[in-house]
Amino acid sequence: QVQLVESGGGLVQAGGSLRLSCAASGSIFSIHCMGWYRQAPGNERELVATITTFGRTNYADSVKGRFTISRDNAKNTAYLQMNSLKPDDTAVYYCNAGSTSGVVGDYWGQGTQVTVSS
């Protein structure tokens, strides 16, 4: 089993920045891909960004150029730096981890709320 704990959400004005963190514990040897997904009220959960153990990244078109995903393998932690935030970025952000890239991982964090005011 893998446990994921997110932190760093909050309220920010449009144009501002936030940094999310996701710390993994447990059977971390099984983790290859970590990522962030988000879900706004009334919407389905959607991919934001993913990163593999080797640093290969993938981003949703809506966040390219504004968000940066990174990973510290020594600390078993993934980060999401969010810049130039927009009200449309308002959502609950979930950390995800799994053993295979390209598919949604088996493990989820509890979610952290990000609210961007206009």
Image (cartoon, helix red, strand yellow):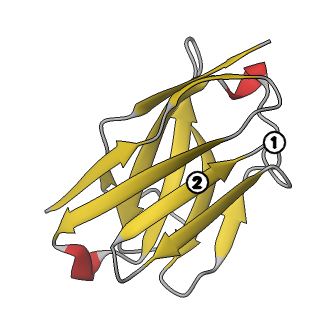
Residue 3 position by quadrant:
bottom left
Instruction: Classify the position of the N terminus by image quarter.
Output: bottom left
Lateral position of residue 76 relative to residue 68, left or right: left
Q: Nearer the viewer, residue 28 or 6?
A: 6
Residue 55 position by quadrant:
bottom right
Callout 2 secondary element: strand
Callout 1 secondary element: loop
Label 2, on which residue?
80
Q: Which mark is residue 74?
A: none
Instruction: Classify the position of the C terminus by image quarter.
Output: top right
- The residue located at (70%, 59%) in the rendering is 68
x and y, in percent, of residue 40 in the image: 58, 21
Residue 24 at least partly seen: yes
Q: Nearer the viewer, residue 18 or 33?
A: 18
Label 1, on which residue?
62
- The residue located at (46%, 71%) in the rendering is 33
Mark 1: amino acid: Ser
x and y, in percent, of residue 109 in the image: 31, 44
Which circle's residue, 2 or 1, is located before the other in the chain?
1
Nearer the camera: disc 2 or disc 1: 2
User: Would you say the residues marked 2 and 1 are in contact, meaning their CB atoms lie under 8 Å apart?
Assistant: no
Q: Nearer the viewer, residue 22 or 97?
A: 22
Mark 1 Cα shell of 10 Å, populated few (<14), some (14-19), many (≥20) = few
State whether residue 91 is above or below residue 22: above
Distance, label 2 to label 1, CA atoms, is 14 Å
Residue 101 at least partly seen: no
Mark 2: amino acid: Leu
- The residue located at (30%, 36%) in the rendering is 110
Mark 2 Cα shell of 10 Å, populated few (<14), some (14-19), many (≥20) = many
x and y, in percent, of residue 42 in the image: 57, 11
